[in-house]
Image: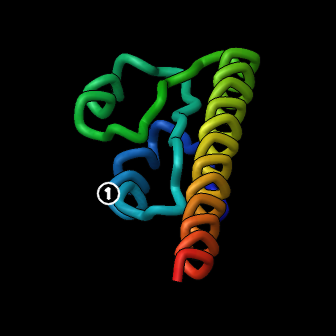
Amino acid sequence: MKKIFLVTSGRDALNILIRVHALKQIDSIFIFCLKPKKYQYLLQTYIKLIGIYTKRHELLNSLKENIILVEKHLETFNFYNQHKQKSTRDLSKESAEFL
C-alpha cells in the first residue's frame, strides 16, 4: 500500500484534517504556515499531524525524516512477512514428510 505525506496550509488545515485524517493511505500530515500558534491546538487532536512549520527547510527535513521512518517500518514488516511465510512453508513440508 502506498503512503501519502500531506502538506497543507494553516488556513485549510482544519477542513482538510477533518476529511482525510481517518484515511489509511495518509501516513503523515504537515502544516506549512506563517502563524503556527494559531494551529497548535490541532496537534492535540490529530495524531497524524506531525508538526507546524514556518520555515521551508524545517518542513523538508521533517518530511525526509518521516519518509525514512516509514521506509524502515515497511522493511521490517516485509522481513517479518517473508519470515512468517517461510516458516509456514517449512512446517507444511515437514508435515508431509512426517506422514
**Horizontal arrangement in the rendering, residue 46 relative to residue 70 (left or right):** left
Q: Quadrant of residue 20?
A: bottom left
Q: Quadrant of the N terminus?
A: bottom right
Q: Evaluate whether residue 6 shows in this view.
A: no
Q: Residue furthest front?
A: 99
Residue 55 locus on image (x, y percent): 67, 16
Name the foreground residue: 87 vs 30: 87
The color scheme shown is rainbow
Q: Which residue is pictured at 75% across the width and 17% down the height? A: 57
Q: Evaluate whether residue 94 shows in this view.
A: yes
Q: Which residue is pictured at 64% across the width and 23% down the height? A: 62
Residue 27 locus on image (x, y percent): 52, 48
Name the foreground residue: 58 vs 82: 82
Q: Amino acid at mark 1?
A: Ile
Q: Residues within 10 Å of mark 1 (few under 14, many from 20)?
A: few
Name the foreground residue: 36 vs 96: 96
Residue 43 locus on image (x, y percent): 32, 29
Q: Where is 85 relative to 4, above or below?
A: below
Q: Quadrant of residue 15?
A: bottom left
Residue beneath disc 1: 18
Residue 9 locus on image (x, y percent): 54, 40
